[in-house]
Every structure is written in C-alpha cells, then in structure tokens.
Image (cartoon, grey):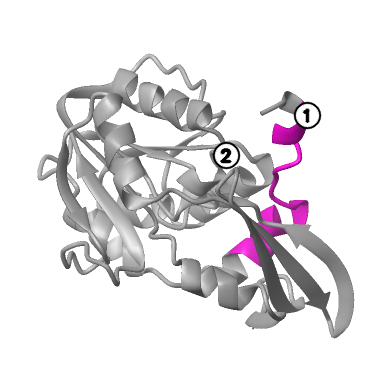
Amino acid sequence: MSEEMNNNYKVGDLIYDANIYDGMNTNLADLQFYKRWLPKNKNARILELCCGTGRLTVPIAKEGYLISGVDYTSSMLEQAKVKASESGLDIEFIEADIRTLDLPEKYDLIFIPFNSIHHLYRNEDLFNAFSVVKKHLKEGGVFLFDCFNPNIQFIVESEKEQKEIAEYTTRDGRKVLVKQVMRYENRTQINRIEWHYFINDEFNSIQNLDMRMYFPQELDSYLEWNGFKIIHKFGAFDEEAFNDNSEKQIFVCQ
C-alpha cells in the first residue's frame, strides 16, 4: 500500500479533544481487569501505552504503583497531567509514538488498553509496536492488551443507517450528540467510521475514526511470530474464555 494511502487513515481532532473524549469514555469495566493483573510487588514498574487522558493511569497510581503513561497526543496528556495533579500524584507522562518508543527502563507490566491497537493500520505498524513492547519488558514480565473481536454482521448492519451512539455534557459545559456511520474495506481490513458531532444542538463536524480490524487467528499468529506466548485469551473483562460470541479479544502474554 502506498504511503499516500496510509495517510488517508486517521482519527479526527475532535475525537482527541480531551473533554469530549472524557465525557464519552466513563465506563471503567476495563480498569478492574487491569488492576487484577497488577504485580503484587508495589515496587514493580508499569508502562501504559496509549494512556489517553489517564483514565486508567491515575487510578492505578492511586493504588501506590509506579506507572508511566505514553501517548501520541499532547492535548490528552495535558488532561492526564491535570488529573494526576488534582489527585496529588506525580506520574511520568511521555509524549511519543508507540511504534518507535525508546526508554532507558524495562518494565514488569506493559499494557495497551481500550482498543488502541485498532489505530495501528498496517501489519508493519503493529509489529513495530510489538517490538517496542518486547524491548521494554523485563524477563518474565507480562504484556496485556484488549481489542474488538470483529463482528461482520454488526458492521454490515451498521453500514445501512446513521445511528446515535452517545449523548452527554462535557466537563467544560458542552452538550454533545454523536451519530455514527461506517463502511468496511475488505482489502485493508479497515472499518471507516464517521462520527457526526452535534454540539449545543448544532451540527459541528464529521470526524473520522478509522479502525483496522484484527481477526482472532490472525492476531494469535502475529503475537507468536513476534515472540510472545499467549498465557490467556479472554472474551470479556470478567475473564470468560474467548468464544464465537465474544465482543472482545483480551490477551495476557509473556
């Protein structure tokens, strides 16, 4: 695929508006899962890749863990720093690309939460991120991440009509309504999602949320090719076994 075509895949700026992001993403079902896998040793070093506004980073730091958060988007990290400061926490937040990250430390636990690998559009991008994880993981360390289990039937149905997916008021007082349409590209395995934003009852903009779909056997193989052993694969955050009807793919690897 040409570089020009790669650049056509993106996530809209408004989706990364920190207050709009936080208003939409209040569910913490994943937090309990990630907390269950924290090392017993509070001196362990933890690295969260794609930490966003610190939705998980801050609560984990509150548990007394030494956690660092990495994200590519400065506005999200600024919000994360505010949350840490409000909680009286000193958390290291690093602005970097997880495909090229190079830190001096190694970590006992590394995790990529919240479906973030769907924004690694090419196999090369995913493999580079896996290499970064391997390079920063201590011997015997654990690597966790979660993503969607592609549901072709859902994608096909969702292509037929615009669907309202969220309505909320942001921390800074904006009333937000989001409607979604999507179109799946078979060749690239990318789900082209458009979020139509209405702010304070007026149409604001259409924002792209393009997501690369990773199918179960494909992802299992990619992990093994890149030197990871899959210890567990769950289909939900309550750790039920992965099956045909699982909405999620949740990995615990070494």
Vertical comparison of 49 with 100: above or below? below
Quarter-wise, where is residue 111 in the image? top left
Residue 95 in the figure: left or right of residue 59:
right
* First in residue order: circle 2 vs circle 1: 1
Vertical comparison of 201 with 118: above or below? below
Viewer-nearest residue: 234 or 85: 234
- Badge 1 element: helix
What amino acid is found at the position of numbered circle 2 in the picture?
A: Tyr
Instruction: Check the picture and name the quadrant holding the C terminus.
Output: top left
Question: Residue at label 1?
Answer: 4
Label annotation for residue 164: none
Task: Check the image and name the residue furthest to the top.
Answer: 104
Task: Calculate the distance from the C-alpha at mark 2 to the C-alpha at mark 1.
Answer: 13 Å
- Badge 2 element: loop
The residues colored magenta run 4-21
Q: Position of residue 41 (x, y in %)?
A: 11, 40
Question: Residue at label 2?
Answer: 121
